[in-house]
Image (cartoon, rainbow, N blue to C red):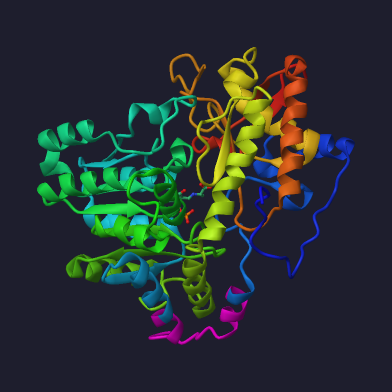
Amino acid sequence: MQTLIEPFRIKMVEPIRQTSAAQRAKILEAAFYNPFLIHADDILIDFLTDSGTGAMSDRQWAAMMVGDESYAGSKSFYKFEAAVKKITGFEHIIPTHQGRAAERILFSIMVKPGQIVPNNTHFDTTRANVEYNRAEARDLVIPEGKVPAAIHPFKGNMDLDKLKALLEEHHATIPLGMMTVTNNSGGGQPVSMDNIRQAGALFRSYKIPFFLDACRFAENAYFIKLREKDYADKSVTVIAREMFSHADGCTMSAKKDGMVNIGGFLALNDGQLAVQARNLLILTEGFPSYGGLAGRDLEALAVGLEEVLHEDYLKYRLRTAEYMGERLLAAGIEIIRPTGGHAVYIDAKQFYPHIPPDQFPGQVLVCELYKLGGIRGVEIGSVMFGKKDPATGQSLAADMELVRLAFPRRMYTQSHFDFAIETIKAAFAKRETTRGLRITWEPPFLRHFTAQFAPLDS
Ligand code: F0G
């Protein structure tokens, strides 16, 4: 059969609210043309993030009922610990409430001012946590990883020559190396096993610990199975295990490939570091057997980590982004190619060539998708990354103007995606008459969350 179906059936439904175009125009105006400020109830299809937004399975909900809420040594912790050990092979497993808590703890104990942390591309919170410790977060993704239209099977790979040069010159000031799988900031692009292995070996040759930012490890493992020589006949569980075997630890936001709405962990082999990490954990997250989570959350996570490695699920998961990508490209709409694991990234510069960066083409498209179809995406361009020139007060453009549509796991069906594709095409059809936006208010940092806009012609 040619049709790939969602590998689940629906047992509980959550109605979504339809709104009229006139209502949405008013809602958008009241939210100052910033979809972060729209009530989720007024959204029809929410592609803001794939983080913590997915649907849990009946087995996960059932597991929550047997959660052991003991403060210390809960049964649920040992189930969670065994599940993480089985996949990662790491020795010390420290639960946290989400990914950034694991990052904060890891960098607080390892990173000193003036040091450099290399990564393929740091995610925003990872970068912020490195910089908070007054160190430099250095991105070393391969050149293809920065060109939306460049085709490469593993666009998330680290540039090993650059890494080698950096290590030769600065190894004494590199406290650890990181690798983000998949590379979210670069389009959800995978990293090959060969690249993980070689990067790991380079760090090891300088005795520098190497950590994976493993949020989307299962999606990455399935890309390896599909695209890398010698892995087609291996199970994703075996592939994932090998990915982790090249590292000394990982940080994890379980809100992605943990298939839960909240949760994360830090895992590592070094016993002394683990002691330091647990001490910090107690300070802000909680006792080491719950780390800011309820026992029931740990139960759901243990089941989620097993379910995410089901290959029929991963096949459907990666096909979802590919399906939307194929249809957008066929309509002449440029996206980051090939599509990654968890999202489709539309190139808003190509979409609206007449709208300059200081009129925010990505933000314009995000607003159009809401107005036309009640769809919420996020701008990743000059609103998120652009800065103000301190001398002139002019906006400085970001490298790329993108709109990310990130897909919650097991939540939307094919017709939701068809509807979204139709909406994007409708925005494309009226692109020439679509005008830019101007900022009317912005906070001093992280402006994309709360900035206010107005149409240029108002
Ligand atoms: N690392 C990566 C690669 C991520 O994508 C995220 C979160 C984190 C770390 C932090 O994890 O949110 O649990 O603290 N990414 C979300 C997103 C927010 O929308 O891409 P967290």
Residue name at image x 77 percent, y 53 percent: 41
For the record, the magenta segment spans 60-78
* Residue 429 position in % (x across, y down): 77, 21
* Residue 55 position in % (x across, y down): 63, 63
Q: Which of 198 and 19 is in front in this view?
A: 198
Q: Nearer the viewer, residue 356 or 47?
A: 47
Residue name at image x 38 percent, y 70 percent: 84
In which image quadrant can residue 441 be found?
top right
In which image quadrant can residue 332 be found?
top right
* Residue 249 position in % (x across, y down): 28, 60
- Left or right, residue 431 beside residue 173: right
Residue name at image x 68 percent, y 40 percent: 35
Tell me if I can see residue 32 in this picture: no
Q: Which of 111 and 307 is in front in this view?
A: 307
- Left or right, residue 50 beside residue 198: right
> Is 344 placed above or below 415 here?
above
> Is 225 placed above or below 394 here?
below
For the view shown, which residue lies furthest in the front direction? 1
Quarter in which the C terminus is drawn = top right
Q: Which of 284 and 1 is in front in this view?
A: 1
Residue name at image x 45 percent, y 39 percent: 185
> Is 60 placed above or below 208 here?
below
Is 388 within the magenta?
A: no
